[in-house]
Image (spheres, helix red, strand yellow):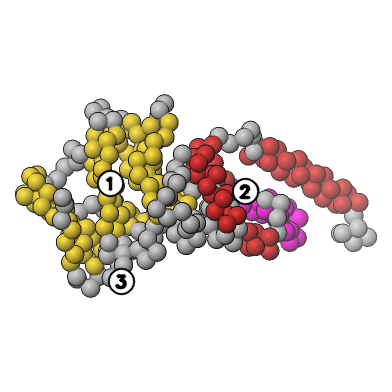
Amino acid sequence: MTRDQDPARLDADVDAHSDIAHRLADVADVVEIGAAPYQAVLRGGRRRKTRRWALGALAAATIVASTGSLALAVVDGRDRAQVASDQGTARARHVYTPRATPLTEVRGGSGTPVARVELQVWDAPRDDAEARGQKRAMTQAGVWDERTTDPAPNFDQPWYAIVVRTAGKGDKVESFGLQDKEPGGDDGLSFASVEFEVQGRTVTVGHVGPGTKRVEYEYEHGTSEPELHRAAGSAYLWFTRQEGEPGPSGTLVSIRLHGEDKVVTTVQED
């Protein structure tokens, strides 16, 4: 009798496989419990998908390690071909739900965070059906703009909203707009900013073209350089400033944008 024909060996393998199946079922029950709240859906969609990929990989690794044979992990109930085809759908492109990027925290007098400023970017619809679906989703989220000056669907321009999220007070949209078709213009340099109050503190959020390397705020007594950040789904570079932050004093004189070719553009404040 060969080793593979040994009845005791075969029974042990069956028991091991059964035990593995029960343990994987227990893991799956732990991972998915209840329905995700709306805010978690906005912030955690990508994390949730990553967790499912990780769980699938863990299951495959466990089976391979126990049996010594090759196993195929089905992730999220779909094969790779289906996952790849979904990348071009409106849902995968975030036409109906935005990509969210935290920009800054606002802290109270004691140093405790009291609010968070977040950028939400909705990808451009590709046809009338996607445009209608995006309007419904944006209206529900409270960021829709009737766009009376340009009522035609914007098939090639992502939409962004600057949202303040305050615990116990909900969300407030402070600014919104369409991304330029050519962010930064011919030289990749551009500038736009908005100011608003959060818990009694003035916050500035601005964006520049992708060709901008540095932004300098020049005051009567010195200069400051806000840090530039990329944001998911946006071609702009974003920055924030808050009232009371350490830095130079006096009246703001100008804002200078530095490009890679050392060209400096001066933006005068009103």
Foreground mark, 2 or 1, reads 1
Q: What residue type is labelled 2?
A: Arg
- SS of the residue under disc 2: helix
Q: What residue type is labelled 3?
A: Asp
- SS of the residue under disc 3: loop
**Residue projecting furthest to the right:** 1
User: Which x, y percent locates residue 141?
Assistant: 49, 40
Residue at 63% across / 33% down in the picture?
34
Q: How many labels does the image show?
A: 3
Q: Which of marks 2 and 1 is nearer the N terminus?
A: 2
Foreground: 50 or 4? 50
Q: Mark 3 — residue?
A: 186
Q: Which of marks 3 and 1 is nearer the N terminus?
A: 3
What's the mark number on residue 194?
1
Q: Which amino acid does label 1 sit on?
A: Val
Q: Which of marks 3 and 2 is nearer the N terminus?
A: 2
Lateral position of residue 47 relative to residue 188, left or right:
right
